[in-house]
Image: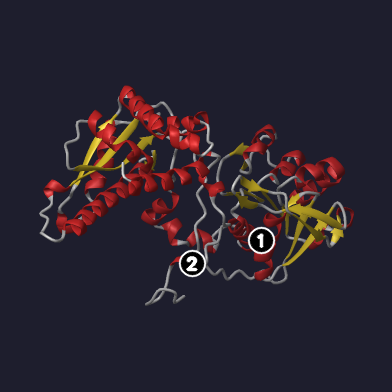
Amino acid sequence: MGPKVCGGIAAIFCLMFVLIGGSAVYSQMWWEDSGEKHDYNLSGYRFLIVLGEDFDYQETVVVKQFWEKWGAKVYIAGTGLELTGHLWKRTEKGWDRSETKRIQTDLLLSEVDLSTYQAIFFPGGNSPKSLLETEGWRVIELIQQADKKGLVLAAICHGPQVLAAAGVVKGRKVTGHHEVAADLTGAGAEYVNQVCVVDENTVTGNWPYFETMAIQVAERVLYPRGGGPSEKSPFETDPVLKAIKERRSVRGFQERDVEESKIELILKAATWAPSANNDQPWKFVVVKSKDTKQKILNAFLDRMKDYYEGQGIPLDRVEPFWAGIWAAPVHIFALCDTSVVEIEEGWEETETLWSAQGVSAACQNMLLAAHALGLGSVWTGGSLAVEDEIKSMLDVPEGVKLMTVIAVGYPAHEPLPPVRRPLSDVMFFEKWGNK
């Protein structure tokens, strides 16, 4: 294997190592930012943020800034007149929260007059635990009174813990950090792993979807019967755009078999992809054999063992990640067959690239089709590390290139979406650099 190929594989797996530690959401270094402009008018509305010690600073400040930008007056009530929050930052060793920042509160919890507010927001971090340990009875009474008055009760990440303690989530659908899921279900709520959930007057969400949290609270206040701008977004109303937005890379699967009819539909969707000159250079090998998959997994781990050890990463940390992917009931090997392409002399490299682009388009069709059929899937580029071994096991002829392997099955869980860079960061007008 040449240095160029090895370098490419190294890059792939350096990225993979970040993902092993958790979901793709937590591997990213930016917060949710759609780049869209929202015309909410919160002038005349007053929101209250309730904090305890060691609160999540970014959750608090970023959400607050959204509401203030839309005209709301936002006040902070806390267990003290000055509190400490932690900030998250990405380091070589993972996420770090050692940096702290102090914040001045506007009033104490004992001074809160609920009649002047339309929404109360509880950020996460250790703030919920601190609130319940130091002024639990006051916080619970405050939440229960706010719920009776119909105020919007909003909480993010660990924040829903205080809503559970107050007993206001019974019979409601909620979300939040998985560490508080037991508290929520124990309080009679239905826990779901989603970005943000609105049920009656409760709005619960997850880190790092600060913009969505701010939007949903604003819309619950301004449009209590629904019909806010976010519900009218084309990515909510158009089925194709909605499928594109909601498709996820799934890395954990149920043992349930996938129906043959669905596999056929996925492959038919693949063949409707565009290709240069309509060459249709794709070929697909569908594999269900557990024995074959195990052999591929073993070959992969054996090939990459020295690399892992050189990076100081124990194999037992890597193996479960890949074992979960190769445990999917179906794997579709996407290959590029340039024998069907009429390649002109001097255009070999370009037309080979065009063929690869066609297969890539077919793979995207498969991912979207799987999602539309209620299945989960993931594009696994790491399989290229053992392309020769795979081609040998599958009797793939010489000259046919393995592009990727797509794992398909019924998801064991629904992962949260990775946040996206705003369009303003990736789009230019007429020339590079023109925003």
x%, y% of residue 320?
48, 30
Nearer to us of marks 2 and 1 is 2
What's the image's color scheme? secondary structure
Query: Vertically, is 234 above or below 198?
Result: below
Q: Nearer the viewer, residue 232 or 96?
A: 96
Q: Which residue corresponds to mark 1? A: 62
**Type of the residue with mark 1:** Val
Direction top: furthest residue: 291
Q: Which residue corresponds to mark 2? A: 425
Q: Nearer the viewer, residue 187 or 279?
A: 279
Direction right: furthest residue: 110
Residue at figure coordinates x 50%, y 41% from the top left: 17
Query: Vertically, is 305 above or below 88?
Result: above
Horizontal side of residue 312 vs 74, given as left or right: left
Horizontal side of residue 269 vs 156, given as left or right: left
Confirm or deny contact between disc 2 and disc 1 (CB under 8 A).
no
Horizontal side of residue 181 vs 167, given as left or right: left
Q: Work out whether mark 2 precedes mark 1 in sequence or the reverse, and give the earlier one.
A: 1
Residue 306 falls in which quadrant of the image? top left
x%, y% of residue 399?
17, 42
Q: Nearer the viewer, residue 187 or 271?
A: 271
Q: How many marks?
A: 2
x%, y% of residue 430?
37, 77
Horizontal side of residue 217 vs 54, given as left or right: left
Circle 2 residues within 10 Å: few <14, some 14–19, many ≥20: few
- The kind of secondary structure element at disc 2 is helix
**Type of the residue with mark 2:** Asp
